[in-house]
Image (cartoon, grey):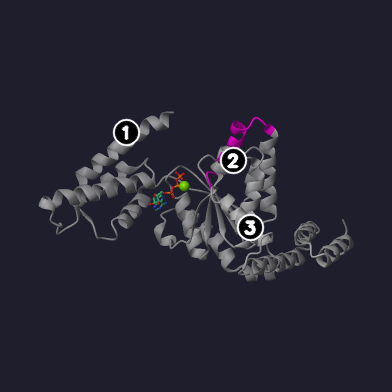
Amino acid sequence: MTQFNFIKDIAKYGLENDREKLLNVLNELIDYSKKTKKINFALQLQSILKDAIREHHTSTLTKVGSNEYYDKLDDRELSEFIIEKLTSNYSFENLVCDDLVKDELNHFIEEHQSADMLQRFNLPISNKIILHGPSGCGKTLASYVIAGELHKMMVVINLGAIVSSKLGETSKNLSKIFRKAASEDCIIFIDEFDSLGKVRDYNQDHGEMKRVVNTILQLFDYLPQSSVVIAATNQIGMIDDALLRRFDMNIKFDMPNEIQIKELVIKTLKNGQFVFNKPQSVISTIKLCIGLSYYSIQKTLITAIKRSLFINSNNKTVPMSAIIDMDIWKGLIQQEKKALKPLKKR
Ligand SMILES: Nc1ncnc2c1ncn2[C@@H]1O[C@H](COP(=O)(O)OP(=O)(O)OP(=O)(O)O)[C@@H](O)[C@H]1O
Ligand SMILES: [Mg+2]
């Protein structure tokens, strides 16, 4: 298709008031312009399109049969796939990680905060990020931090539910969710991104898996620059290579080392609100935590704080001090390690 053909189609659908076809042809033109390296034009057109869509969505009355009416129906259909829609108050303060992870997350956030400047220089904005690593090491937490730092609403998608939905509907549902999130300028957070691999198990139709992967590839390619997609997985090996390549950033979260455990403990103790009864054995207890995730360590410490409080509060009086019994914490750490051992062997 040449540019003249696009112009003819745009004139035709515009004059016929056929909004859906007009949007399709405009999206095709954006794609064509990107492929023919007219990036600046593509971005400008994309932004015009986004503004128009947003304006369209803010009209107050819903006419039956109108696009808004169908969007509202979509809302209802989509609710089972959206785990939650949230705004976040999290910031880097809440996350413990190594400097490399922090720097990468910071770069990602900076690009969105300085989007205007990047667009002025025709530079693409990184907007697709995949967070991976073992369970309980801060992937979900980091997505909240991104949402909090960018002051954007986040839609958390249940990919497992979409994938196991009605035969052949996966691609359609994914497209609807992406369209909706893009029009509302939300961050899309796809947790358990590896469940895409499960299409094979749920579905005898092997073509379905390919279709779903292709849909995601397309959705990623057409994603407006201001939209953000965050995917998280603890099984990165399950994800198709073509999909992995589409992410602008790939960040690995690891189990905490001694320094990070110490930082987590200080944060959990609310910077001094709680203290240990045997400060001299803090270092050895921190060493004992090595091998556990941030989540498990925090869980044992919080349980130890609560149990110590109960011990101190005989006869239900509020304790004067919040002193943590180190032996209780150590016992809980050992218990947690023992409980996780059989899981690791599997
Ligand atoms: N890096 C971290 N810094 C501070 N707290 C953490 C960190 N990682 C985990 N936590 C604590 O553990 C909780 C659970 O972590 P989170 O949900 O982010 O893990 P995850 O990596 O997404 O795990 P999963 O793979 O099981 O989804 C967090 O809400 C937080 O309280
Ligand atoms: Mg998670």
Q: Amino acid at mark 1?
A: Lys
Camera-nearest label, 3 or 1? 3
Q: Is residue 265 visible?
A: yes
- Label 2 neighbourhood size at 10 Å, few (<14), some (14-19), many (20+)? many
Towards the viewer: 98 or 66:
66
Residue at image position (32%, 43%) is 289
Towards the viewer: 222 or 344:
222
Contact check, label 3 and label 1, Cβ < 8 Å: no
Q: Judge left or right: residue 187 versus residue 134.
A: right
User: Horizontal and vertical percent for residue 231?
Assistant: 55, 49
> Which segment did they paint magenta?
191-206
- Give the distance between the C-alpha atoms of the residues marked 2 and 1, in whole angstroms: 35 Å
Where is residue 64, by image quadrant?
A: bottom right
Camera-nearest label, 3 or 2? 3
Q: Amino acid at mark 3?
A: Asp
Q: Which residue is mark 2?
A: 163
User: Horizontal and vertical percent for residue 266?
Assistant: 31, 56
Q: Which residue is mark 3?
A: 71
Task: Give the secondary structure at mark 1.
Answer: helix
> Which label number is shown at residue 338?
1
- Give the distance between the C-alpha atoms of the residues marked 3 and 2, in whole angstroms: 21 Å
- Which callout, 3 or 2, points at the residue further toward the start of the chain? 3
